Amino acid sequence: MAIAAAGCYFSSLSSAVTYRGSLLPGLGRLASTAPRDSPFPLSLKSERKRPPKKDSSSPPPPSAKTSWDKGKPISQKKYPGRSKDERPYPFVDGDRNRGSAGRSDSTGFGSSGLQRKEKRGFNFTEQRSQTEPGKFQDAASLNAVVKVYCTHTEPDYSLPWQKQRQYTSTGSAFMIGDGKLLTNAHCVEHYTQVKVKRRGDDTKYVAKVLAKGIDCDIALLSVESEGFWKGAEPLQLGRLPQLQDAVTVVGYPLGGDTISVTKGVVSRIEVTSYAHGSSDLLGIQIDAAINPGNSGGPAFNDQGECIGVAFQVYRSEEAENIGYVIPTTVVSHFLNDYDRNGKYTGFPCLGVLLQKLENPALRECLKVQSNEGVLVRRVEPTSDANNVLKEGDVITSFDDVHVGCEGTVPFRSSERIAFRYLISQKFAGDVVQLGIIRAGTFVKVPVILNPRVHLVPYHIEGGQPSYLIIAGLVFTPLSEPLIDEECEDSIGLKLLAKARYSLARFKGEQIVILSQVLANEVNIGYEDMGNQQVLKFNGTQIKNIRHLAHLVDSCKDKYLVFEFEDNYLAVLEREAAMAASSCILKDYGIPAERSSDLLEPYVDLPTDNEKVEQDFGNSPVSSLEIGNDGILWA
């Protein structure tokens, strides 16, 4: 998994996680290849460890700690029979680590949230037990930071009809008023119970998760008990800091049970890869120490104002003291989104792959007179931009803000920042005006911004993956958690390339794979099949797993014919397959032949048949395209 990833990783800070009876494999999903929509390695995602069902899922030996810590969220996790001070992995609080036996794992990711209209500030809860003396000694601010105790039960993606063993983790959170708390989304991912405890109190109160922003790694909690809020003062949200401004990080990191305070300065402010959500949003880099358990805790300026939420660290043999804070601008966006819609809808994207126009000959060829603009290389079929933009267009402005030839725009007084920063300031459904040059003519076009549609999701909505069992053949949609659990070697390079670089051609499209075959007389000869994409059923192209279930249910033919990659066929006699299903389920202790979401009536998707017939990955997006020369918003 993450250990195979090259380069540096972001790690979120999370609390220590304890698995009952055994260690669970990594919580976060890390891929050894670069993500489709980020110039950073997939290892930027939080790494979660899975239950001890597979030896391959267990975490690397202590000697591999550095590689695990690179670029991953850090959360400290507790395992049964082990001390809470065991060496944590780079996971943020609330992240679950699979297969990490013999040590505590930490996974965490930075999350960006929006500032609520009625919120006044944030609380920080770090796992550190030491407090540094200095200007920041505001007891009210420290008391607003609480410790988070979360019990997690993660799905088993290889055996999607069941869940893994539960484990616990600790992290930090802070009060923002109106009975609400803010923490990191990775701290409460796959939660079954969340409790919080105030500084100097020995009572834990049950908290409710109101909203989670996976892309910005922020979660909104509420506590109904009036006793919890007695004498509490919410934190005040501050402005975006300047470089070299002093910063104080507060939370409950590993090393002790009491609150911890560390100090540093603001080192950098730019668009940063968020490990947990595999997204690019504004981030603050600081040199103050951030450790497992700090996730979800606040960062203060010298005036005692909250300037952001600690969420991840960057670890490498060549670098040290690089931590990241979600700025209040992202927090405000999260809270405003929740206030507007009653739920979190996510950050929008433009859905365009761009190329810089630094070369004068390239600009002259495209009839761009000035030193500005970026070239549209590819447009996502599921985005609204697909109806407006064309390959070869040059985007020169975004809502009248000029875009430079390197894909940057003005930021504050004398700085520049990545173009996607402007997109992150918008909400889903907002309409923006793009200035473009097409065949030498300048025009303005309106584009609606919406969240990106992922062909292979990084997180499963609803928590439990879909599955369909037909005569022992187990079908499920491909997802990043499944790739992590199965290990990339067993997935195959061709399927892995599709997962990394192909774009969804229509909303609702999925890559459906045959995960495994439960051996039975009816499927003799197919027992060794696994992790192969099914393309057609009885000659019909498969859109998603709901479509496959519908095709099987409505089939009246004598045979069930499944077509896989490279013209591989699996044929079953329909009546014999249906008759053997109940016996197979009983033999393997499976409660149902399909997940509950597949019991709902099937509604056909309004798609272009021509698009469905095309093969996945006809024009893959290579890692080079997403790196230095291109930008893909997600």
Image: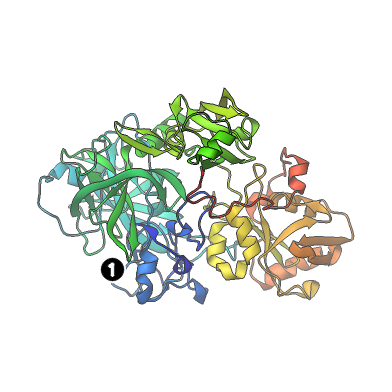
The residue located at (74%, 66%) in the rendering is 582
Query: Residue 400's spot in the image, x, y percent?
Result: 45, 24
Pick the front one: 300 or 395 = 395
Judge whether 448 appears above or below 172 on screen: above
Which colour style is shown? rainbow
Judge whether 260 appears above or below 425 on screen: below
Q: Is residue 197 left or right of residue 101?
A: left
Pick the front one: 278 or 231 = 278
Name the residue carrying label 1: 84
Q: Is residue 613 left or right of residue 398?
A: right
Judge whether 532 appears above or below 260 on screen: below
The residue located at (41%, 64%) in the rendering is 167
Q: Is residue 172 left or right of residue 304?
A: right
**Residue that protrudes farthest toward the right in the picture:** 558
Query: Residue 544's spot in the image, x, y percent?
Result: 69, 50
Query: Which element carries disc 1, helix, strand or loop?
Result: loop
The residue located at (34%, 50%) in the rendering is 206
Pick the front one: 287 or 119 = 287
Work out whether residue 400 can be spotted: yes
Question: Crowding at label 1, few (<14), some or many (≥20) Cα neighbours within 10 Å?
Answer: many
Count of all numbered marks drawn on residues in the image = 1
User: Which quadrant would residue 6 be assigned to in this image?
Assistant: bottom left
Pick the front one: 118 or 301 = 301
Work out whether residue 294 can be spotted: no
Query: Residue 397's spot in the image, x, y percent?
Result: 48, 28
Query: Residue 172's spot in the image, x, y percent?
Result: 29, 52
Amino acid type of the residue tagged 1 in the rendering:
Lys
